[in-house]
Image: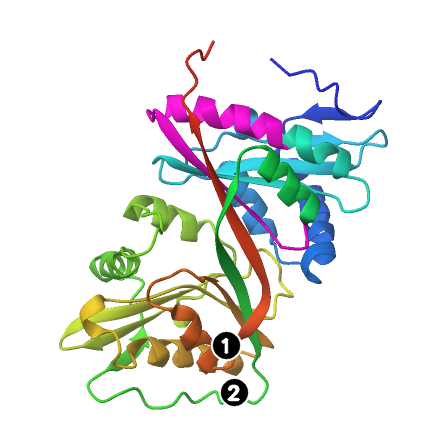
Amino acid sequence: MMPVMTELPAGWTLRRPTLDDAPRILEMVHASDIAAVGEADFTLDEVHEELTGPHTDMNRDSWLVLDDGGRIAGWAYPRNPTGKARDFVEVYVHPEIGLPAQRPLLRLMMARMAERAAELGHQVYAVRAAAVPTETRYIDALTDAGFTFRKQHARMQMPLAGVSPQPPEPPAGVLIRPVRAGDETEMRQFHAVIEAAFQDSDHRALAYPDWREQFLAESGVDFAEWFVAETDGVIAGALQSGGSGGDDENDEGWVKSLGVLRPYRKRGVGEALLRRALAVYAAQGRAKAGLGVDLANPTDAASLYRKVGMTALYRANVYETTVPAASDLR
């Protein structure tokens, strides 16, 4: 049943999205990004992924608000690919017309969080959201909804002009090579290294079938940009690059995941993997490289990224609250 949103301006409508809406959603998200951080930072692939990801049903979990001229003013959706007791709420609004949709969409999503908790079998459900520090109205809305600050993430980037397409030699005893994407055993090892490397953070583990389905759905994935680090006869580290995001003009090499097993840290393995990726991105004509990092990561990964020349394009605050499971799902 479609809720009646009396808080919306006269003539505005609320409905569920479809995949056909994805290009228009992306236009709105790009407008929001540019207003918040100065450049577009979302891809068409990511819109599709958020609408169709694991434990997400766009017909029950996601909302669009349209203004009286039919323009998309806001979009809200959850993200919980693991089905565990923590979800993430995103509310995007158009910076020029969308503010009236922001709090109504957040209220809808928080009500849905309680339902999702019950459906996924959790009595208490953690919910996170993020905002750039300058997004003060959204931060106020989150605070009024019971969210409190938890930590920061940084979106880091560097130009590749001047980066040699020939990477420096890795440390003695370390071999950096492309992953053997056609080898199922090695792909499982690759995934296992990434998951094990993030165990000491609050990274949400993703099962191998879900991880594989996720990257197979990406556009422009190039396994020549995925690398493993071998040392002592084992895969000690792994670097996964992102695809084009559905944008043929995308000129950014994207480090999606970089992890080194605990016994092999502080040996230069992570830096060797990263410098190999940067060299390959440069050789392929990419103009820049980027990644996202949890600034509360106990391995202090951000220090490595600064060492190779990356700086923070922007930082985002992460907020959290908890909700009890809904008792009535009728």
**Amino acid type assigned to the residue bearing label 1 in the image:** Tyr
Farthest left residue? Answer: 232
Residue 163 disc label: 2
Nearest to N terminus: mark 1 or mark 2: 2
Q: Which residues are magenta?
A: 106-135
The answer to whether marks 1 and 2 mark residues whose Cβ atoms lie closer than 8 Å is yes
Residue 147 lies, with reference to residue 189, above or below; the image says above
- Judge whether residue 130 is colored magenta: yes
Q: Where does label 1 land, which residue?
A: 281
Label 2 CA crowd tier, 10 Å (few <14, some 14–19, many 20+): some
Label 1 CA crowd tier, 10 Å (few <14, some 14–19, many 20+): many
234 or 33, which lies in front?
33
Residue 162: x and y in percent read 56, 90
**Amino acid type assigned to the residue bearing label 2 in the image:** Val
Secondary structure, mark 2, is loop
Residue 189: x and y in percent read 22, 60
- Residue at position x 58%, y 75% in the image: 288
Secondary structure, mark 1, is helix
Tally of numbered discs: 2
Residue 29: x and y in percent read 68, 48
